[in-house]
Amino acid sequence: MPKAPPETSLPQGCTNLKLRQFMRRMNQHYDLEMAQVGLKTTQFSLLSCVDKLGPLRPGDLAAGLKMDASTLTRNLKPLVEAGWVTVTAGDNARSRLVSLTESGRAKRAEARRHWRVAQDGINRLLGVDQVLALHALIDQSMEKLAPASEDGDE
């Protein structure tokens, strides 16, 4: 009796590995542009989020970035040392607020032009339709993978 053909409708390989490989390649693309202004892509993302949402509590910033608190603290440190971000006392002794400084706003504006070059390059390399489909797939997948506390099912 002949062997049944392998099931080709199932994903082959590890999804996590494929995503990590994809993210490394994507980070390289963006980091080449960000390096021209002395930033990493992750730092630009942090500056952008703080600019858009700040001042805000570190926990809220971490949640918005889907990042744990210790990673956020580690990633904020060089931005604080550069004088682009401040972490100050909040409403009470236990709370803190993360804010962008004027020099942080200027650095973000400078970096945004390079981010645009990187984004336009991705749009050109992958095609706008594929980038839009990728964004939609990521958004749908993030929603399905949300921890119970994010979607109200505690």
Image (spheres, rainbow, N blue to C red):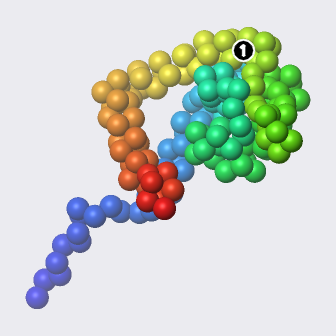
For this orientation, the residue located farthest to the bottom is: 1
Q: Position of residue 69 (x, y in %)?
A: 72, 49
Q: Is residue 76 shown above or below 1?
A: above
Q: Position of residue 127 (x, y in %)?
A: 35, 25
**Kind of element beneath mark 1:** helix
For this orientation, the residue located farthest to the left is: 1
The residue nearer to you, when weighing 130 against 109, is 109
Q: Which residue sits at x=38%, y=30%? A: 131
Q: Is residue 119 shown above or below 58?
A: above
Pointer 1: what residue? 105
- Are there few (<14), some (14-19), or many (20+) residues within 10 Å of tag 1? some
Whether residue 18 is visible here, answered yes or no, is no
Does residue 129 appear left or right of residue 18 in this picture?
Answer: left
Q: How many marks?
A: 1
Residue 89 in which image quadrant:
top right
Q: Position of residue 2 (x, y in %)?
A: 13, 83
Q: In the rendered structure, which amino acid carries the disc numbered 1? A: Arg
Whether residue 141 is visible here, answered yes or no, is yes
Q: Is residue 128 shown above or below 13?
A: above
Q: Which residue sits at x=46%, y=26%? A: 122
The residue nearer to you, when weighing 90 against 138, is 90
Query: In the rendered view of the protein, which quadrant contains the N terminus?
Result: bottom left
Q: Which residue sits at x=58%, y=39%? A: 64
For this orientation, the residue located farthest to the front is: 92
Q: Which residue sits at x=33%, y=61%? A: 11
The residue nearer to you, when weighing 89 against 103, is 89
Does residue 85 appear left or right of residue 111 in this picture?
Answer: right
Q: Position of residue 134 (x, y in %)?
A: 37, 37
Does residue 149 appear left or right of residue 126 in this picture?
Answer: right
